[in-house]
């Protein structure tokens, strides 16, 4: 579903990604970990077609980036740490707007489905700027899955969420991941990620420096694995 | 440490010599013009400077297009070099034109189409520099610079036409005198020689400054690279 | 609910294109209706400018019609800049521009959507200012030719303004930079608009006004084309 070979990204003189190889199959839930500034957000933005690679190969759902970017976008959903929502529109108006943009058939029905799944039906007619950060983040997920994408990308979704909201987000993430989608998430929140992800890749100095699966590691060892990866690198 | 290539040092020396020669020609070889007097001598430098400005203008536009196409940073360096040179030389042309105009028809400025368009172009160049200053990322700076250069370069011909149309429908009193005075004096052979020689010299000055400025841009880029390695 | 996610036929691509444009316009108008920030700011500003001109210039009956086109266009120009800045700031806020860029459609649809919204706001302000000016200064502004000129001029202004605003909102200096970038480049629009407005107000021969109208139309066409071609370079990274 996601095939990345030798991805290089330069910003002027700074090389942020130095030849990343990365692959995600349908049904996999990959956590991309690493300290600040290692290029996680850059990497995700390239996958989301918001940024062009300087070199290397990226294929998503069989389509090449950046050449077939439009085809990729219809099969992909992206949740950033910014909600990408219009504060002066209501919850359902935001979904309606994106629904129209993505040419979703039976918009009303789809919106109801999504709001139901997110538990936001009660706030249908509330302006987004009156919603809490946790609710906005949930709605942002709704925006991303509206067009039923095969690939989902999450960039630091836990940023700024309190305990309750984080737990809610856990539930949302497992729900949306459970449909055979390919999911990539970047986060600092190892505790929540550990149980959600099936695989952990660690990005350090522009390359994937370590990778392991949940089966291999077993519960509770993610933090140790993470620390070791950086000591070795 | 890199120094200027040998070819450029020769060019620098030649340029200075030619400039001295041109100045001598303008002040001693060219005859005194009958109607306007000594101040007419500025005309040689005024037109030549405007010519260099034009060269820079076209070079900037071309470099902008090439940069957007190839994304090679060297074209961005070429483009900003061209803009800077064009900015300075059009300014010199405007200044000399102003000084020349004052005794001839008693005004520092006329809303003449060429002069006005040159002034607007200066404003576009300044806007260009302010745009570049406000962007940190070098790729984005180059991209936005190229886009604005193209917008500016393409707008100038239309601006010129619109102001010329403005003038033909509403001629200003000063205008009728200037049409006759500006560039309409007959040139004797020594004057023609001086004129074309100045043209030639200023083109050489353009090439020299251009080359120097591009080298400077490249050096600047290398310094940034070294700085990054140290960080 | 399975359907082919990417439209492949020309007809479906065109429908997608226009639907995106329509959605963006709907979104901007709805947001504006709720918050009324943009229009209020533009209107109040425009009214203040008109008022200031009253004190700044000698507007006796004789030279009033002569000065009117100039005053109107200065007002529209400045109010237009305000609108452009706000419109783009809304997208930059909360990262909404990314949301627009994630949609599987040609970037030019985003340009057209914003361009038409911005144009709509400018026209709304103009529609309100014209009768106010008419009443305050006792000048009849309801000439169809004048209205045409105002529309054509606004189109040209917003065509290039949308492009440059998308650029300036991504720089450090933001709001301040837009007028600096925009004004030198819209001189032809201003000259042509003021001249043809004046022509219509003073009842000049159509033959005299025609060259200005042609210039306006030419500028509009050229600059919409230029903006379309360059928009991609501004929003992609």
Image (cartoon, coloured by chain):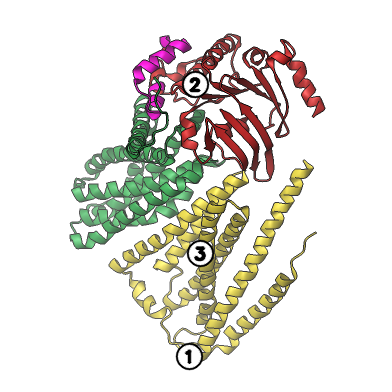
Chain colours: A red, B yellow, C green
Quick one: label 3 or label 1, which is nearer the N terminus? 3
- The lab-note entry on whether marks 2 and 1 share a chain reads no
Asked whether the residues under marks 3 and 1 belong to the same chain, the reply is: yes
Label 3 vs label 1: CA separation? 31 Å
- Helix, strand or loop at disc 2? helix
Position of residue C102 in the picture relative to residue A170 (left or right): left
- Horizontal side of C175 relative to C142 (left or right) equals right
Residue at screen point 71% across, 33% down: A207
Determine which quarter of the picture holds residue A65.
Answer: top right
For marks 3 and 1, give the one nearer the viewer. Answer: 3
Q: In the rendered structure, find residue B58 and report the number of the disc placed on it.
A: 3
> x, y (%) of residue C103?
45, 32
Chain to which mark 3 belongs: B
Quote the CA–CA distance across marks 3 and 2. Answer: 48 Å
Which residue is denoted by mark 2 in the rendering?
Answer: A140
In the foreground, C135 or B43: B43
Chain of the residue where label 2 is placed in the rendered structure: A
The residue nearer to you, when weighing A177 against C161, is A177
Q: Which element is circle 1 on?
A: loop
* Relative side of C175 to B75, left or right: left
* Residue B122 versus residue C121 in the image, above or below: below
Q: Which residues are magenta?
A: A95-122
Q: Which residue is mark 1?
A: B188
Viewer-side residue, C115 vs B118: C115
Above or below, comparing residue C41 to residue B109 in the picture = above
Given contact means CB atoms under 8 Å apart, are the residues at marks 2 and 1 in contact? no
Quarter residue B18 falls in: bottom right
Mark 3 packing: few (<14 Cα in 10 Å), some, or many (20+)? some
- The residue lying at 60 percent from left, 40 percent from top is A53
Using the numbered discs, state the Cα–Cα distance from disc 2 to disc 1 in whole angstroms: 78 Å
| Residue B162 part of the magenta segment | no
């Amino acid at each position: 579903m996601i095939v990345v070979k030798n991805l290089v990204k330069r910003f002027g003189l700074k090389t942020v990604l130095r030849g990343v190889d990365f692959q995600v199959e349908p049904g996999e839930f990959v956590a991309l970990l690493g300290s600040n500034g290692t290029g996680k957000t850059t990497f995700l933005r390239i996958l989301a077609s918001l940024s062009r690679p300087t070199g290397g190969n990226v294929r998503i759902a069989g389509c090449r980036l950046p050449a077939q970017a439009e085809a990729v976008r219809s099969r992909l959903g992206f949740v950033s740490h910014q909600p990408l929502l219009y504060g002066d529109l209501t919850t359902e108006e935001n979904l309606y707007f994106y629904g129209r943009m993505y040419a979703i058939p039976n918009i009303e029905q789809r919106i109801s489905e999504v709001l139901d799944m997110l538990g936001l039906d009660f706030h249908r007619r509330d302006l987004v700027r009156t919603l809490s950060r946790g609710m906005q983040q949930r709605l942002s997920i709704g925006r991303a899955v509206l067009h039923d994408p095969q690939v989902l990308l999450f960039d630091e979704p836990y940023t700024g969420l309190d305990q309750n909201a984080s737990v809610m987000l856990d539930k949302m993430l497992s729900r949306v991941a459970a449909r055979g989608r390919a999911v990539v998430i970047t986060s600092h929140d190892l505790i929540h990620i550990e149980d959600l992800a099936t695989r952990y890749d660690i990005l350090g100095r522009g390359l994937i420096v370590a990778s392991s699966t949940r089966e291999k590691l077993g519960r509770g060892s993610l933090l140790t694995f993470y620390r070791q990866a950086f000591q070795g690198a | 440490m890199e120094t200027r290539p040998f070819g450029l040092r020769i060019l620098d020396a030649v340029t200075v010599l030619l400039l001295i020669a041109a100045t001598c020609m303008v002040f001693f070889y060219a005859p005194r013009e009958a109607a306007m007097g000594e101040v007419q001598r500025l005309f040689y430098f005024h037109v030549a400077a405007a010519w260099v400005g034009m060269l820079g203008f076209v070079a900037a536009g071309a470099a902008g297009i090439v940069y957007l196409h190839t994304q090679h940073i060297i074209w961005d360096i070429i483009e900003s070099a061209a803009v800077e040179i064009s900015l300075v030389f059009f300014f010199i042309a405007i200044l000399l034109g102003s000084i020349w105009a004052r005794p001839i028809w008693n005004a520092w400025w006329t809303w003449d189409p060429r002069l006005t368009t040159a002034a607007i172009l200066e404003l576009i160049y300044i806007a260009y520099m302010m745009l570049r200053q406000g962007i940190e990322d070098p790729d984005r700076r180059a991209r936005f610079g190229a886009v604005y250069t193209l917008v500016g370069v393409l707008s100038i011909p239309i601006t010129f036409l619109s102001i010329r149309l403005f003038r033909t429908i509403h001629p200003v009193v000063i205008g009728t005198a200037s049409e006759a005075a500006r560039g309409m004096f007959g040139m004797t052979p020594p004057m023609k020689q001086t004129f074309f020689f100045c043209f030639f010299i200023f083109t050489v000055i353009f090439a020299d400054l251009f080359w120097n400025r591009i080298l400077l841009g490249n050096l600047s880029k290398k310094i940034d690279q070294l700085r990054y390695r140290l960080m | 609910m399975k359907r082919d996610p990417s439209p492949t036929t020309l007809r479906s691509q065109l429908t997608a294109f226009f639907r995106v444009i329509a959605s963006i316009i709907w979104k901007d108008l709805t947001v504006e209706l709720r918050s009324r920030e943009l229009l209020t700011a533009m209107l109040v500003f425009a009214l203040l400018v008109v008022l200031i001109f009253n004190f700044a210039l000698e507007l006796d009956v004789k030279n009033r019609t002569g000065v009117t086109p100039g005053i109107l266009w200065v007002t529209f120009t400045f109010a237009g800049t305000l609108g452009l800045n706000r419109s783009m700031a809304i997208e930059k806020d909360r990262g909404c521009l990314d949301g627009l860029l994630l949609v599987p459609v040609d970037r030019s649809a985003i340009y057209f959507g914003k361009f038409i919204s911005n144009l709509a706001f400018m026209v709304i302000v103009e529609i309100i200012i014209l009768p106010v000016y008419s009443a305050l200064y006792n000048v009849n502004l309801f000439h169809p030719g004048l209205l045409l000129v105002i529309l054509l001029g606004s189109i040209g202004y917003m065509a290039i303004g949308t492009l440059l605003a998308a650029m300036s909102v991504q720089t450090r200096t933001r709001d301040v930079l837009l007028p600096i970038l925009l004004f030198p480049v819209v001189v032809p629009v201003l000259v042509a608009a003021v001249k043809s407005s004046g022509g219509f107000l003073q009842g000049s021969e159509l033959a005299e006004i025609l060259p200005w109208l042609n210039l306006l139309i030419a500028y509009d066409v050229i600059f919409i084309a230029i903006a379309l071609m360059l928009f991609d370079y501004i929003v992609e990274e």
